[in-house]
Image (spheres, coloured by chain):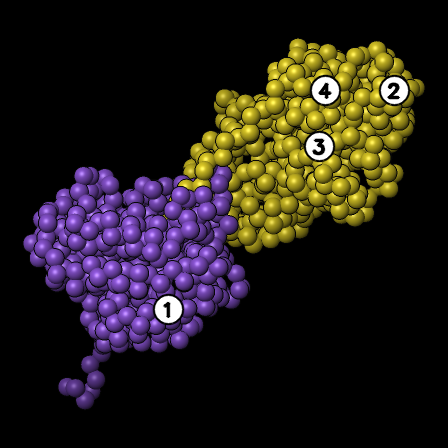
Chain colours: A purple, B yellow
Amino acid sequence: MRKYRVFDVGQNSDYFNDNSGTSLDNKAIIEKVAHKCYLPANAVLLQNIKNHPDFKASFSISGVALEQFEKFAPEVINSFKALVETGNVELLSETYHHSLASIYSPEEFKNQIKLHRKKIRDLFGVTPSIFRNTELIYSNEIAKMAEEMGYKAILAEGADHVLDWRSPAFIYKPLGSENIKLLLKHYRLSDDIAFRFSQQSWEGWPLTAPKFTEWVASHNGNGETINLFMDYETFGEHQWEDTGIFEFLRHLPRAILERGDIDFVTPSEAIEKYEVRGELDVPFYVSWADTERDLSAWMSNDLQKEALKTLYSLGEEIIYVDDPELIEDWRRLQTSDHFYYMCTKWWNDGDVHKYFSPYESPYEAFIAYMNVLQDIRLRLEAAKKKQEYQIALNKVRPLRFSEI
Amino acid sequence: MFGWEFPPFNSGGLGVACEGLSKALVSSGVDLTFVLPVKLPISIPWCKFVFANESDIDEEQIKDLFSGYQSHSRNTEIDQYGLPKSISGSLMQRVKAYASRVPIIARKNKHSVIHAHDWLTYPAGIAAHEASGKPLVVHVHATQFDQCAGDNINKEVYNVELEGYRKADAIVTVSNRVKNTVINKYGIPSEKIKVVHNGVEFQKSDADVPEFIKKIKDNGGKIVLFAGRITVQKGPDYFVKMAEKVLQHEPNTYFIVSGSGDMEGQMIRMIAERGLSSKFIFCGFLRGKELATIYRDSDIYVMPSVSEPFGLLPLETMVSGTPALISKESGVSEITSNILKSHFWDVDDMSDKVISVLRHDKLCNYLSENGNKEVKNIHWKKAAESLISVYNSLDDAFSMFLLPSPPAFESAKVPSF
């Protein structure tokens, strides 16, 4: 979202286009990450599948990300299509707008999943049967909703405070659901790649494919599935090419497969192959964010709460107004990143380096966001008036002579 | 330590900084003698005061004397006030007269390091340095380039500053911003300069809300504050332009201006031309409790300074629990995060931020609470510790003071994406 000022309110409703070339410019960002991450990483995976027909992977890509690739880097869409066509790559469902609707509005949540399902079908010709929520946000409640929508499994963070003594290397069943299975992220092994790969102070550094294979193999006999879930931008964006991350990705399939006792599976295959080993009760929200693994990155301070409250209270009326553009803009404002940028968890420590944001401060993010909501409010009022007017028009329509 | 002014006989931040620093240095164990150019009725318990000129002068005269700022046009008229001959004359003459009396003081008072604040005292510092041979630290609170807000500087003053920087054994600046000026405009090597940010010691007002403010608030009005000298350096013209924009969106807003200066007339004319006179309240130069009360009762303080070497006032408003919007062209922006920042020339951005604070109570409260928390860690003790480590590096006698332990950096946590 661009730096939308109070003077823009009521003047223009173009919130998302910024041509500044800065970190607020979506086109510039997409082009950058396409070349640093998506294109080279997809090329490595495609080659891996060609070299090793037993190599598998799966993706959860939000609708807003897909849209931006279509617009600014269509070659990325093509490279994903090529991967899906191999049959070795599974696509998962999520909310179209990468939103927090699972927490605020069950109805909106389901609508966004349907929108995403349609998008995946249109682009890739497949219909996902596994669900993963924004930022791996999960609870019994969310599992229940995914079950109602017909999903066979849902992904979640294998956080210590959820698992306690249990291992993430088995398939579970959410408490309160019957027909949905739970796949938990093996956060230690996942984060070894996602966060620690290039950390020279880490005892595991440098991480090689054989070394990682050893760590995976050490679960043999007391685990059935190791779920490695990570941000795809790990490859080339968070861990730059010069760290050797692409080499690691290239060598991993052979190192794993030549052992003969470990194989790759997609989430759908995993739940077919293995039995449910236990029931897991998660009455509160967990996510994969930060050390806290909770929702505090998006909704811990008063600014975030105010923004979310205002957004979803506007929604109560917006969805009943016949204005598709207004509804779409309102949905785009639900993307969790908007609230992440308002987070002051790191800001207050004065450690600005931990504040990943295109805005100069959480305050700037809040100000621009609330200005946009003010404009949305004006549009809603106008749309309501128009609708009322049309209804009124119909009511008092004078009888024409010919109708008598 | 050589100073020029000292509260309550001060015209700006220099005196406040000298007070805060001297107090913190003494409480950290430094044996401090503070030298001032003229005899002032100061009763400060924490250190010994020496006056270069012991002749008595009355309060009226003091009032006209203490200022070193060019904005006080009275300086040129000082001859007419019948001051003792030795301390009358132009500012430059007084600066030189101050220096001429220093060698005696330097010989009489035992010391291991000499510390001089701003150009007004550099000649005095140099004189002491030459008399005793002890290392000289010059403390840069501002340069000519800050005070003239541009390159149109006073050459004579520039030369005094340059000599001070060259002859000093170490230079302390109040911000990175000033450090860069000293490097770029005076050609001083960066290794010689250490940045020591100022601290703040301020009391939130506990006075009743003044009647005129009560009236505004009872009608649902909001208050935006400008405080400080009304000079080109402080950007009062940008404040007026911002006010005009804010009023277009939030008409029930009032702008309080506290302070005086040579641009006051121009500012008032600008306001009148725009038809905003009924929205501005000028309350003159305030200090102490009155100022603190205005700080506390404003909804936001704006400091649109064109150039601000440090800028103490936003820290004082943060203590008072009032959010601040400061220009990025200020030293204080280097050490504050729970504050709003704009470029002084970006009137749209400033207006946007002010309107947002006035509209969203949550934002206002959040800035107020977190700014207040943050400012608790910006204190003079920290500045004093940095200064002691500068002294240490210059003189063995100071090694008796333990070096402050380095701040414990939190080891990098796993970031989330």
Real-space Cα separation, disc 2 to disc 1, in angstroms: 74 Å
Say whether marks 4 and 1 touch (CB < 8 Å): no
| Marked residue chain, label 3 | B
| Residue with the most extreme bottom position | A402
Give left or right: position of A356 versus B116: left
Tell me the number on the disc at residue B131. 2
Q: Nearer the viewer, residue A323 or A344?
A: A344
Sequence order check, earlier mark of 2 and 4:
2
- Residue A255, given in percent of the width and then of the height, sits at 31, 61
- Tag 3 residue: B172
Real-space Cα separation, disc 2 to disc 3, in angstroms: 22 Å
The amino acid on which the numbered mark 3 sits, given as a three-letter code, is Val
| Residue with the most extreme left position | A178
Say whether marks 3 and 4 touch (CB < 8 Å): no
- How many neighbours does mark 2 have within 10 angstroms: few (below 14), some (14-19), or many (20 or more)? some
Give me the residue at 25% from left, 60% from top: A259
- Tag 1 residue: A44
- Tag 4 residue: B396
Sequence order check, earlier mark of 2 and 3:
2
The amino acid on which the numbered mark 2 sits, given as a three-letter code, is Ala
Placement of the C terminus of chain A among the 4 image quadrants: bottom left
- Residue A213, given in percent of the width and then of the height, sits at 29, 55
| Marked residue chain, label 4 | B
| Marked residue chain, label 2 | B
Real-space Cα separation, disc 4 to disc 1, in angstroms: 62 Å
Q: Are marks 3 and 1 on the same chain?
A: no
